[in-house]
Image (tube, rainbow, N blue to C red):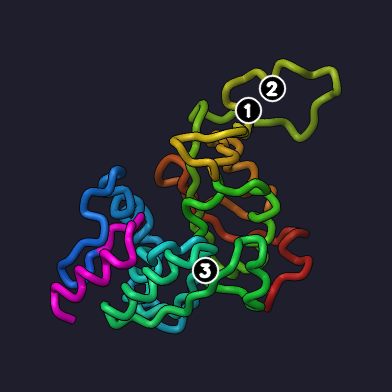
């Protein structure tokens, strides 16, 4: 594809949230968040094998396919899902330009089970805080993870965590006032101008919800970023895809 055709195709599908390098042409060179995607990728790139031939990947909320393309380039069979048709069109365009094969589906995270299968590696990044029912979604996601979940969410509040006891008497009140107790902040209207920013956890809540959904946290390389593996957990055993 000639450079002018490439530029025209990018413009026709814009605006882009993912800044991709398509044969030397950037899709969002003036992104307000700068190089955040590259920064996140540098935190998780080593989690995945260099040779992923034979491995399956699910990218939930794939957007224009930044992570999907990275893992497909390593040989993985990548499935991307998003509920925004424009993002999926961008991902198809990018995959076509780069000669990468992606299986793309228009699906909401609550319907992830409609894919009818589990995946070796699942990315669930930049989606959690956009959900009205985040724990329900995380439980659905847990059932399709075979080996590894890479999870990322916006976090706010205290970065430290209070080690919660297994139980508290009904009279206990003070623990809820400690800054590091697991908490979710509900956004009634907008945050950062975005009406889909619904629930923003602190670090303690993000970790606690992952454990509650049936994961063991193996690494926490950056704020809001967690690398997990499935545990033998009742939620996972109930109705897990093969």
Residue 115 visible somewhere in the drawing: yes
Q: State the SS at label 2.
A: helix
CA gap between label 1 and label 3 equals 33 Å
* Direction from residue 128 to residue 68 in the image, left or right: left
Q: Residue at x 51, y 26 (%)?
A: 158
**Residue 63 in the image: x percent, y percent?**
43, 62
* Left or right: residue 173 compared with residue 205: right
Q: For the residues carrying marks 3 and 2, which lies nearer the camera in this image?
A: 3
Q: Nearer the viewer, mark 1 or mark 3?
A: 3
Is 7 covered by the magenta stretch?
yes
Q: Which mark is residue 157?
A: none
Q: Earlier in the sequence, mark 3 or mark 2?
A: 3
Q: Going from the N terminus, do you reach mark 1 or mark 3 first? A: 3
| Residue at which label 2 appears | 176
Residue 155 placed where, x, y %?
49, 37
Q: Which residue is mark 1?
A: 181
Q: Is residue 169 above or below residue 112?
A: above
Which element is circle 3 on?
strand
Q: Are marks 2 and 1 in contact (CB under 8 Å)?
A: yes
Q: Which residue is mark 3?
A: 81
Instruction: Give the Cα distance between marks 3 and 2.
Output: 37 Å
**Residue range of the region highlighted in magenta in the rendering:** 1-20
């Amino acid at each position: 594809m000639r450079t002018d055709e490439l530029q025209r195709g990018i413009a026709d599908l814009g605006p882009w949230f993912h800044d991709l390098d398509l044969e030397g042409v950037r899709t969002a060179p003036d992104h307000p968040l700068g190089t955040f995607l590259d920064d996140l990728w540098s935190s998780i790139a080593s989690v995945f094998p260099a040779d992923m031939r034979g491995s399956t990947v699910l990218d939930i909320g794939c957007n224009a396919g930044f992570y999907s393309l990275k893992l497909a380039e390593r040989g993985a069979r990548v499935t991307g899902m998003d509920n925004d048709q424009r993002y999926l069109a961008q991902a198809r365009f990018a995959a076509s330009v780069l000669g990468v094969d992606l299986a793309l589906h228009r699906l909401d995270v609550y319907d992830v089970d409609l894919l009818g299968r589990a995946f070796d590696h699942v990315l669930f990044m930049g989606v959690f805080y956009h959900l009205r029912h985040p724990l329900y979604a995380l439980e659905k996601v847990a059932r399709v993870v075979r080996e590894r979940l890479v999870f990322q969410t916006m976090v706010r509040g205290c970065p430290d965590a209070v080690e919660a006891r297994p139980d508290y008497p009904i009279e206990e009140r003070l623990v809820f006032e400690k800054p590091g107790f697991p908490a979710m902040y509900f956004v009634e209207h907008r945050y950062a101008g975005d009406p889909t920013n619904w629930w923003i956890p602190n670090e303690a809540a993000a970790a606690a919800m992952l454990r509650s959904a049936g994961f063991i946290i193996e690494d926490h390389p950056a704020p809001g970023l967690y690398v997990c593996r499935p545990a033998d957990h009742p939620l996972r055993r109930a109705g897990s895809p093969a």
